[in-house]
Every structure is written in C-alpha cells, then in structure tokens.
Amino acid sequence: MVFYIPRAYVGYVAFMLQYYVHERIRDMIRLAVGLYKYSERVDGFLEQSLYWSSMSFEYIIRCTYGKESHRKELNEIIIDMCDSLKGTNSERETLFQSLDGLRRIRNKMFHPEGAISDHEAKSLLSYVCKMGGCEFDSLLKEITYEQVRQLRNRVFKIPSVLPGAKIPDQPDICESDFDDLEVLYEKCKCLHYNKLVTYLSPLRLEPEEMSELIPTTGAIWLPWVLGQSGKRRHVRTIVLEVRFSPERVRVGIDFGSEAFEAKAAYYNLISAGKLNGHLERLARRDYCFYDTYWYFHVRNVRPVKDCYPLGMEEIKSGIESALFEIEMKRHRRILMKGHQLLIGKIFARGSKEFNQFLTRIPETVKEIFYDLVPVAGSVMQSSKVTDLKPFANN
C-alpha cells in the first residue's frame, strides 16, 4: 500500500509513513495540549484534553489510511499500515507496538476500560503532536489561555455573542444571585449586551466579549473598549470593566493580559504627572487605587485622595519596577495576570454601597465610566493602540 500525501499535509515521518494532518486536526491537537496545560486550574479540562487527543489520533490514522478506512476497525488499519511499510521486521514491529499502545489508551477514553493515568495521557498527547508535526514541550510552554479559548470556539464552532445579538431579558440582579454564578452569568449577559448598551452609547464605548462561565475562576468580566470593538481588542488594550465575583463588584479601569503598550503608557502618564488633573477630580469623587492578582483578586485598596497629591512620590517609586515587569513579560511572552494602580470603585457585598449599587446598576456604571473615559482616552492616545497583533497566529 502506498500513501501519497501532499507536502502541505506531511506530518511526523516514521520510516516511509507520512501522516495526513489537515488544519482542523492541527487545531484539535493544539486544543488538546492547551486543555492539558490548564487542567489543574479548570475542572473538566483533563477529560476534554484526552477526548481531543484521542480524536486527533484516530482522525490522523484514518485520514492517512484513505477512503476505505470507514470499513475497518482501528486495529485493522494499524496492522495494514505497519505491514505495508518498507523496513525491517523489527522496525515495523516497533511502530506497531507504539500505535497499538496509543489505540489502547484511546479505547480507555471511549470505552469503560479503566482509568487513564497521567503518564498515558501525556504519552498519547506527545505522540499525537509528533504525528501532527509539532513539538509537545514547546507547544505546552507557549500556548496561552486566550489561544485555548479561540481554539475551543474554532473546533467546537461556538458562535460568539456579538453586539446586537438577541439576548433574552432577565430580571434585575439581586444579592442572592451572587451565591450562584450560573444564575448571575445569565443576568450579566443581559446587562452587558442589552441594558448597558443603551446607557453607554453616548460615551463611544463598545462592549467586547464577556468572559466565559468557568465556575472555578470565580468571576465574571464585562469589558468595554473605546472606539470600535471586535477581534477581542480588550485583551490587548486598556478597558473599562464591570467585574462580578461572589464577594464584590468592581467597576473601573483594567488591562487585558497582553496590553503591554497601553499599561506602560498608563504608568508613564502617572509618573510624568500628565494624569494629575484627572486624579484631582477622581480624588474628590471617592475613587480608589487598587492592585489585582490572578485576574480578579484585589489587594492594596487605598482612596485616591490619600495618595494625591501628597502620596504620589511613593506611587511613582513603584512604577519603575512595574514598567520593568511589563517589559520582561512582553519579552518572554508571558501573560499579565494582575495589575497595579488600577482606578475604580469597589462595592463589597454586605455594605450599604453594595445595596445601593444593586438598585441602579446601569446608572452607576455609566457615571463611573463617564469619569474614567478621559483617562482611558489619554492612555489610548499615548500608546497609539489600534489593532495590536496577539502573541502568535492562532
């Protein structure tokens, strides 16, 4: 049997065997690696990784075998493929043992044949990467969560919620919703794409894609950008956000995980005193500085009026190290998972301010965004952020 594969589709070569790997299979392989990478953080990702690595393995074998693959079982195809190859008996036997071993791991995934160990999962994934013409360790190191999200949408063909899409109306958000993120998420979707669009349209703000519902992350992110939205610009620039967690709601400035230029511009503007007029106004209106870590956790909350103007030298002293961190992460292609000196308001659950916020959410968000749009505009102009390219082609 001769396998003729066009050069554009040549994958891992074992003796004279060339694997047929089209682009959708490559996406499935990359998705499997990304899900494996983040499986310790998100429940269910390991099982999804095993599923897509198993599917990738079977697709590659069947596509390589040809049109008659649907008539045969996977083990029969592997036997035929190995028997047809040039080489010594020992080489053919070695290849058969490898492919048949992976087939057995694949069977554990689709049939109740026992649990799959982490060693087996990694072995299957590593070999499938070779079949697909990529290197497991390099891909594991480089792939980002943002790329995993995009790959999931592409492989699953999940349509994004776009501005103008019809979102079912929901009752107003109430305090009990904060005990169940699934309920809160549906109400936030209505808030983000329906109610706030009406209130915020005069501010030239556009809604970007809200975060996925992953309960183990513990937060729901509603990002807005100045100017035209789309292509997930919020990942690479300054945003105005509403962020819900079980303990609080945060409304204010934030940065995407790849917003290196915008974040550096923000710190440089503060350090040069070019935001002093804005800070003076925000200090009178009870805004806070705060830092974040691991995306949505908050620390170092302090009123702007306690920092401006008397505490600005202390703030500026920390900006140099923050700028160094930005440059280091940009150079090493590391996502930014937290930020310093964000400005906004925090409504802690159980406080009087929290209860007041719930009674007029759209109005309060509009008031806060109105105060912060000039800051975001200054950062945008200084950084000249238009449509920055992400880390890598996804």
Image (tube, grey):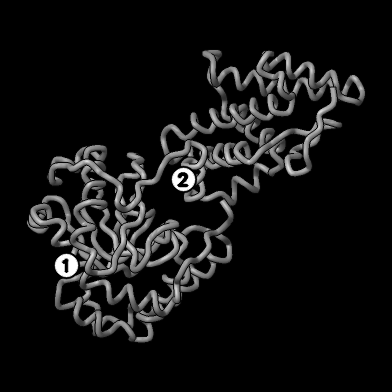
On screen, residue 161 versus residue 192, left or right, reads right
Give coordinates of residue 281: x percent, y percent. 19, 80
Q: Is residue 270 above or below residue 195?
A: below
Q: Is residue 221 above or below residue 324?
A: above
Disc 2 marks a residue whose amino acid type is: Arg
Q: Which residue is mark 1?
A: 367
Q: Which mark is residue 265?
A: none
Q: Is residue 128 above or below residue 287?
A: above
Disc 1 marks a residue whose amino acid type is: Glu
Query: Which residue appears at 14% of the width and 56% of the height?
Result: 361
Pick the front one: 139 or 160: 160
Report crowding for label 2: few under 14, some 14 to 19, many 20 or more residues within 10 A (C-alpha): some
Q: Is residue 152 above or below residue 366?
A: above
Q: CA distance from mark 1 to mark 2?
A: 32 Å
On screen, residue 244 versus residue 65, left or right, reads left
On screen, residue 367 versus residue 123, left or right, reads left
Q: Quadrant of residue 273?
A: bottom left
Q: Which residue is mark 2?
A: 149
Pick the front one: 97 or 323: 97
